[in-house]
Amino acid sequence: MIERKFQVESAGNVRLDLFLKNRLPELSRAQIQKAIKDGLVLVNGRKARPGQKVKEGEAIELRLVESVTEDRLEPEPVSFHIIYEDEHIVVVDKPPGLVVHPGAGVKRGTLVHGLLYLYPEIANVGSAARPGIVHRLDKDTSGVMVVARTQSAYLSLRRQFEERMVDKTYLALALGRFRQKKGMIDLPLGRHVHHRQKISVRTKKPRVAITHYQVLREFKNSTFLALQPVTGRTHQLRVHLSATGHPLAGDTRYGGRSEQKTRYPRLFLHAWKIKLRHPLSGQEMEFESPLPPELEEILQKEAVIK
């Protein structure tokens, strides 16, 4: 069962089915349209109409029983470190290079496959394609992630993320020097107008995206930063830094140069800390993943460049 609630921040003349598809990528547009037709989508407490467009400030609710797919994920052993676990949640330290869930071109060996191997009950939590997953990290980003083990934990954690109750802090190395020691990047993001596989500030459908940054250490040609995203847009940190003229070290997709690969063998972006409330007790909890040795080594090399 998928139970989701959304508050429309900005409308932009968008159809309800497209609005929901952008926020529920695990569902097809046909599934969403059928849910609207079957009366399973409410707008301000009333059944939605086919073709209806969303308006700013509206509250949208969806309840949908997921169909069982033939492509049920098979558990398999996958290497990753567990920071914390109880009956409701698992907190993992995702290594770089590990894909979180199956997608285009990746069918096996993901974090989800490894989670199912250790915690079979997760198969019935949340989306069948992304069981237990309430947020994600890019393949090349390392660090702390929280996963739900029960449906009630899943719904609670999703609500916390949607209502921006979760505090996340990343460590990053950006190229160049910053004029201010701390600040905010407020640049709306969306699909690039020409390159649809990329996220960009150049988009026809901008969505609010805000990142706070603080300089931790300065080097000759780079800056070590703490980043706190307020919103959780795809590739937000990478695109925000690139758009300000300071792409992430090792990020050849968004503004970096190919020769960076020799100097920076991997993307320098690490999910350092996450703070949230336990889905059952409501207790505030904070988890941390130390900076990996290969990133520590990069910092040491940056420090000796004169």
Image: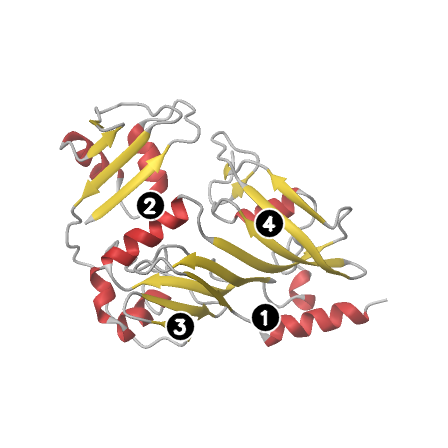
Q: Residues within 10 Å of mark 2 (few under 14, many from 20)?
A: few
What numbered label is drawn on residue 291? Answer: 1
Question: With 228 as the anchor, is 70 left or right in this view?
Answer: left
Label 3 – label 4 distance at C-alpha: 33 Å
Q: Quadrant of residue 146?
A: bottom left
Three-letter amino acid code at the position of disc 3? Tyr
Three-letter amino acid code at the position of disc 1? Leu
Q: Nearer the viewer, mark 3 or mark 4?
A: 3
Above-or-below relation of 278 to 296 = above
Q: Quadrant of residue 55?
A: top left
Element under label 1? loop
The residue singled out by tag 4 in the image is: 254
What numbered label is drawn on residue 84? Answer: 3
Three-letter amino acid code at the position of disc 4? Tyr
Q: Nearer the viewer, residue 45 or 129?
A: 45
Q: Quick one: label 3 or label 1, which is nearer the N terminus?
A: 3
Q: Quick one: label 3 or label 2, which is nearer the N terminus?
A: 2
Q: Residues within 10 Å of mark 3 (few under 14, many from 20)?
A: few
Q: Nearer the viewer, mark 2 or mark 4?
A: 2
Question: With 19 as the anchor, is 37 left or right in this view?
Answer: left
